[in-house]
Image (cartoon, rainbow, N blue to C red):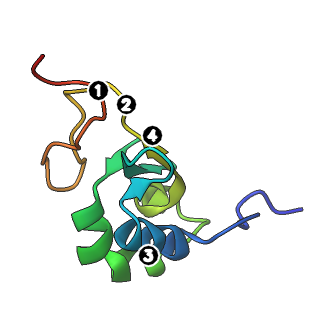
Amino acid sequence: MNVNEPMGPTSIELANLLVKEPYAWPGGYPRYALMMDGGALCVACCKSEAKRIADVDPNCPDDQQWRIHSLTVNREDTDLTCDHCNNDIESAYGGDE
């Protein structure tokens, strides 16, 4: 078994899903892409960088920043930013009270 082969959806499938459904359901929580290198990618960058995400080489260590590990929810991190564009990633519960 090759650990570099995806067991589930591919990175581009996850990116397309995030663009299509940026909020988790139920709850409507804002989602983002968690990358294989631990970084975060926002919805807009998943859309604008789709070609780069689709062309990723799973065997190239430098491409880990473009491989999507999973889609996840930002619940409370008000300082979370996209590692590509540096824009804020919306949080579900953080912010002004």
In three-dimensional space, the C-alpha distance between marks 1 and 3, rounded to whole angstroms, equals 25 Å
Identify the element where label 3 is drawn: helix
The amino acid at mark 4 is Gly
Task: Tell me which label, 3 or 4, sits earlier in the chain.
Answer: 3
Foreground disc of the pair 4, 2: 2
Direction from residue 77 to residue 78 in the image, left or right: left
Name the residue type under label 3: Asn
User: Would residue 97 appear left or right of 68 to someone viewing this image?
Assistant: left
x%, y% of residue 87? 12, 48
Q: Residues within 10 Å of mark 1 (few under 14, many from 20)?
A: few
What residue type is disc 1 on?
A: Tyr
Determine contact: label 1, label 2, CB under 8 Å.
Answer: yes
Residue at 65% x, 69% y is 9
Q: Which of the two labelled residues, at mark 4 and mark 1, occupies the earlier sequence position? A: 4
Which residue is tagged 1? 93
Q: Is residue 17 above or below residue 85?
A: below
Distance, label 2 to label 3, CA atoms, is 22 Å
Dot 4 alpha-carbon crowd within 10 angstroms: few under 14, some 14 to 19, many 20 or more: few
Residue for badge 2: 75
